[in-house]
Image (cartoon, rainbow, N blue to C red):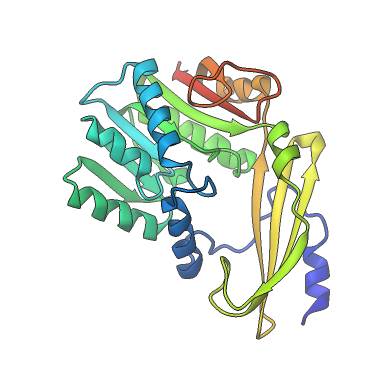
Amino acid sequence: MNLDLILQYQQKPEPFTPGEPLFWNDPHISAQMLKAHLNPDNDLASRRPQTIQKSLDWLVTTLGLQAGNNVLDLGCGPGLYAARLAEKGMRVTGVDTSRRSIDYATQYASEHHLDIFYRYQDYLTLADESQYDVALLIYGDLCPLSPNQRRTLLGNVRRALKPGGHFVLDVTTRTHRQKHGNRNGWYAGQTGFWKPGPHLVLEEGFDYPEQSVFLDQAIVIEADDKVSVYRNWFQDYDRETITAELKQAGFAVLNAWNDLLGTPFTDDTEWIGLVAQKE
């Protein structure tokens, strides 16, 4: 076991230092992620089906969405939102960087005769222009990105929207992080989320309170002593900071809630749901 390397990884890294480059597209990890997305009994990868349906019903009413509207679903995963919107007659484009999720979503849409165009693509490379009435970035997908990546993504979203188009997203707050964030410990198994064979996992959370940033890190050691480090970064917000970031990117925040169900905003919320408009 390479203890020097493990000790190196346990030092607090600079914010948004990357870990393993093959992550959600890893053959084993992507299979575990798809199972988690499709599991109706927890909110680990996607929210539960009943929450997704309530959220979309609320958004359709709030935004006045109609059949024929063009919707962009960023980080669409296996199409849990896209399929429901297409069932309401909307023309949906789904973008995700997991080949396994896109393949599943494409097959589901074909089998159910849904008008959805799925693209296996990193949304940081999105180049669409003035095509969509609404863009969705749901379940905190903005939060893992570095400042430069967020600027790129927000610029891509703004360019992709039609004039006056709406941008729907939700982000986490420090309240959420304080409740859920710090996991420090270890476990071993014959198989698991990270690897198909025997491995040891060292979990650690690193907090950067002055920047409202948190790192959830897993050091994975396999039986042949191979060491991999997986890093999930999270940028947390309050109402003022997310409003300012969106304004800087050319969006006006129309309203904010405690979620994307319309729960009135409170300062102690774990999530902030927002509807913004392209200026």
Q: Residue 174, position in %: x, y?
A: 72, 33
In which quarter of the view is residue 270 placed? Answer: top right
State whether residue 249 appears in this view.
no
- Against 122, is 157 above or below? above
Residue 131 position by quadrant: top left
Residue 151, image x, y percentages: 56, 35
* Image location (x, y in percent) of residue 97: 43, 53
- Can you say which quadrant of the picture contains the C terminus? top left
Q: Farthest residue toward the bottom?
A: 224
**Count the marks: how many?**
0
Residue at the image point whose x is 63% and y is 43% from the top: 146
Q: Is residue 31 above or below residue 48?
A: below
Residue drawn 40% across the image and 42% down it: 126
Residue in the image at 67% along x and 31% along y: 173
The N terminus: image quadrant = bottom right
Of residues 196 and 134, the one nearer the viewer is 196
* Outermost residue to the top: 254
In the image, 102 versus 17, the foreground residue is 102
Residue 138 in view of the camera: yes
What's the residue at 63%, 38% (across, down)?
147
Q: In the rendered view, would you say 49 is above or below 245?
A: below
Q: Is residue 200 left or right of residue 62?
A: right
Q: Residue furthest front?
A: 41
Residue 84: horizontal and vertical position, in percent? Answer: 30, 36
Where, by quadrant of the figure, is residue 76 drawn?
Answer: top left
